[in-house]
Image (cartoon, helix red, strand yellow):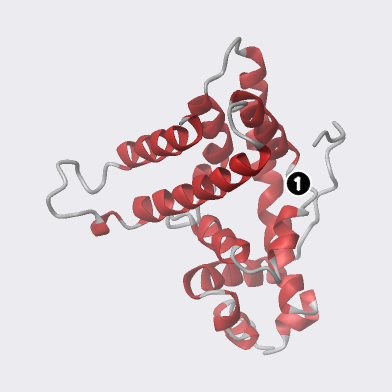
Amino acid sequence: MKVSDEEPQVRRFKPSALRLIDAAEKLFGERGIDNVPLQEVAETAGQANKFAVQYHFKTREGLIDAVFEARLPAINRRRQEYVERLRAMEHPTIVDLLWAMIGPVIDQVDAEGKHRYSRFSAQVRIDPRYRAGWFGSRHLAAVNDVIDMLRAATSHLSRAEFDVRMMFVIDIFDSGLRLVDSPEILPPSSEHSASDSSMILETMVAVAAAGLSS
């Protein structure tokens, strides 16, 4: 999909709304979209008004959309930097392209250095009621550019095969970032240090690339 070079307008949020966004991102990512009462989101955000979510965002879906509106502009800008480097390369590899896809999400961490946005978006993508808000975001121009490049680099795959494999790739990315955040779940027999996040990320991309290349 080709998009305009014009930067989409970025939505601005009040500090109280941002606290609700942070709380929702954390709670929804940990427990699922429907397993967290909106009142708990307000309490976690330190809001005295138990209807604070409804005041700022009207509905649960409005809150989910707000998380994307708060996070995706920065991710899109970072990914655009990757895209510009890819276009300067004569023959970018599938590994290069996959780093352009996941690198900006790796960079998106919370105050504790955890990939909270990745967990949140994973919960949204598996729910057909809410995932349209992610896929329809105004701030996915750069990821669409990367996907176009990946399609061109995997011409041995039909459109249907590519789409299915990309769903597995996204699952691999989600699992990899979860492992980076919780290295203690690595097998005790692992020869690698549980804190070796670089190894985990490189292996994650290599496995994803193999899935697209075969």
Quarter of the view holding residue 87: top right
Left or right of 49, for residue 24: left
Q: Residue furthest top?
A: 90
Q: Secondary structure at mark 1?
A: loop
Residue at coordinates 42% horizontally, 50% vertically from top-left? 177
Q: Position of residue 41 (x, y in %)?
A: 60, 80
Q: Residues within 10 Å of mark 1 (few under 14, many from 20)?
A: many
Q: Position of residue 91 (x, y in %)?
A: 58, 13
Q: Amino acid at mark 1?
A: His
Quarter of the image where the N terminus is located: top right
Residue 154's image quarter? top right
**Rendered view: 184 above or below 202:** below
Residue 22: image x %, image y %? 59, 66
- Is 85 situated above or below 30? above
* Res 128 → quadrant: bottom right
Q: Which residue is mark 1?
A: 139
Where residue 192 appears, as percent x and y from the top left, is 19, 41
